[in-house]
Image (cartoon, grey):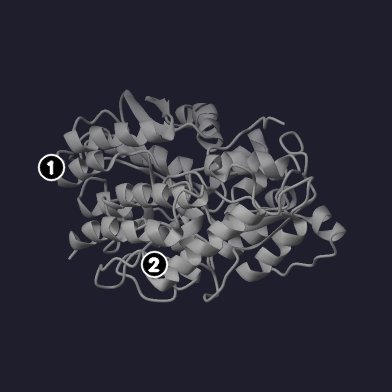
């Protein structure tokens, strides 16, 4: 069954070549000043990704334009990889083509530290009506550098285990709100039948595909990409154990042809009743509960991300609105960014488009709106609970020298993650062993680690 509102996952995106980002991280881009304003005729150009929430923002922009005469907003909508390439090239060259950009939690701290983005701290904290403290603390921390906030979340997410309650009931299985990975593996073995697979997991190569969920598994098994000294840990016993567990679970009780599956493919499989469980982004729940897009609406259950040696293992991601310092219209751009991430905007989306379409995981107050509570009762509480429980400063067993869960916020990580993901995908496909794949991955990761020392 085709989904009417298919969601291209943004949890840990891929597609930007490391060379482009490396160029951006060495380029001089301090060309923006405080010129421009909300007065007069101003056209704001926003570069954004083509997902449903951003399409909703474009649909509702007329409300902003009516309330702010003289300001018009033009959306330039792109596929995820194209967006990242275009935005990075624009910021790196200082061209100033975009007044507002949609960027991920991966880029914001790097670009903020390079002074490429407008510091929004004073504008946000000085506006009592905007209530910046209402933004979920983990997201606000992830978008700040040295106490300065360089972006605001349009929506946020963590990762959860989604399961078909009817299949579990038929198999006589009861699941807790905090399952372990070992328990999940046992359930998958029982639920793997001729009619449906036991679990769906990403196997498609890519740092934002395969390694988004796999990094969280590695972390709860006690591994991580690097230690505190930036020495790579890719072939450490804990990293190997986590990857071997994931690969075994996927190949023994997962979907057929796993290396072709990422977010959308697993979403389609679960929504059509062809798999019993799926571990992935929490934003999927709103689609699974939509009867127009899902055959299993009303039949789903949701738990915290499975764990092993840690108390939590969910990831943390957000798509955010930021303003390049190259903009000629900083005041008008700030006005729009605040409007699109405000409490009032969430209310507008609910009233105009439907309450399940309110951007999730950004503001605490959203989860207190009665209409949203009713419409999103199946998934809203668990989403907020998990997002407030994860620890991006130390998601694994050991300390790490960066803030982030399913990614390492260094420019080289995209290339490292992509290469190691391809090696692991080869192991999933049976072309190599996990140990051999990660031994090769260790050398790749160490080269990048040496640059951080």
Q: Is residue 171 left or right of residue 156?
A: right
* 390 versus 63 height, above or below: below
Of the numbered discs 1 and 2, the one sitting upstream in the chain is 1
Give x and y (percent) for residue 54: 50, 35
- Is residue 279 among the parts visible in the rendering? no
* 366 versus 395 height, above or below: above
Residue 28, numbered label: 1
Mark 1–mark 2 Cα distance, whole angstroms, equals: 32 Å
Q: Is residue 450 left or right of residue 377?
A: left
Give x and y (percent) for residue 424: 44, 52
Q: Secondary structure at mark 1?
A: loop
Identity of the residue drawn at 34% across and 24% down? 43
Identity of the residue drawn at 54% across and 39% down? 260
Q: Is residue 237 left or right of residue 199?
A: left
Identify the image quadrant of the N terminus: top right
State which quadrant residue 252 falls in: bottom right
State which quadrant residue 98 falls in: top left
Mark 2 neighbour class, 10 Å CA radius: few under 14, some 14 to 19, many 20 or more: many
State which quadrant residue 31 falls in: top left
Give x and y (percent) for residue 285: 66, 48
- Is residue 163 among the parts visible in the rendering? yes
Residue at the disc numbered 2: 224
> Does the CB distance between marks 1 and 2 fall below 8 Å?
no
Q: 111 or 351: which is nearer to us?
A: 111
Q: Secondary structure at mark 2?
A: loop
Identify the image quadrant of the C terminus: bottom left
């Amino acid at each position: 069954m085709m989904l009417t509102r298919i969601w291209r996952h943004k949890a840990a995106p891929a597609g930007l070549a490391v060379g482009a980002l490396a160029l951006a991280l060495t380029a001089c881009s301090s060309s923006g000043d405080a010129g421009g304003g909300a007065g007069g005729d101003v056209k704001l150009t926003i570069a954004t990704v083509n997902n449903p929430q951003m399409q909703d923002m474009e649909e509702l922009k007329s409300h902003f334009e009516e309330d702010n005469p003289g300001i018009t907003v033009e959306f330039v909508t792109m596929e995820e990889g194209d967006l990242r390439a275009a935005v990075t090239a624009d910021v790196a060259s200082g061209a100033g083509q975009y007044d507002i950009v949609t960027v991920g939690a991966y880029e914001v701290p790097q670009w903020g530290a390079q002074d490429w983005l407008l510091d929004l701290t004073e504008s946000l904290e000085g506006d009592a009506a905007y209530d910046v403290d209402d933004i979920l603390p983990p997201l606000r921390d992830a978008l700040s550098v040295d106490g300065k906030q360089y972006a605001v979340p349009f929506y946020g997410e963590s990762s959860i285990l989604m399961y078909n309650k009817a299949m579990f009931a038929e198999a006589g299985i009861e699941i807790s709100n905090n399952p372990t990975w070992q328990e999940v593996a046992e359930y998958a073995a029982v639920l793997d039948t001729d009619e449906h697979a036991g679990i769906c997991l990403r196997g498609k190569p890519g740092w934002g595909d395969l390694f988004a969920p796999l990094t969280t598994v590695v972390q709860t098994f006690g591994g991580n990409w690097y230690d505190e000294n930036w020495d790579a840990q890719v072939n450490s016993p804990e990293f190997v154990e986590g990857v071997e567990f994931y690969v075994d679970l996927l190949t023994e009780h997962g979907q057929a042809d796993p290396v072709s599956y990422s977010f959308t493919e697993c979403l389609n499989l679960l929504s059509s009743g062809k798999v019993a469980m799926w571990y992935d982004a929490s934003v999927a729940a709103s689609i699974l509960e939509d009867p127009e897009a899902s055959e299993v609406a009303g039949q789903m259950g949701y738990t915290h991300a499975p764990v092993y040696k840690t108390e939590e293992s969910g990831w943390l991601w957000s798509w955010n609105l930021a303003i390049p310092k190259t903009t000629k219209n900083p005041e008008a751009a700030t006005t729009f960014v605040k409007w699109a991430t405000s409490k009032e905007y969430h209310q507008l989306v609910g009233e105009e488009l439907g309450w399940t379409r309110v951007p999730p995981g950004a503001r605490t107050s959203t989860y207190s709106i009665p209409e949203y509570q009713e419409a999103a009762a199946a998934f809203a509480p668990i989403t907020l609970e998990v997002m407030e429980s994860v620890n991006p400063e130390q998601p694994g067993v050991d300390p790490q020298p960066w803030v982030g869960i399913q990614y390492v916020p260094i420019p080289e990580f995209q290339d490292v993650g992509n290469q190691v993901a391809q090696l692991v995908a080869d192991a999933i496909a049976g072309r190599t062993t996990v140990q051999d794949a990660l031994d090769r991955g260790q050398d790749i990761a160490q080269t990048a680690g040496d640059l951080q020392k």
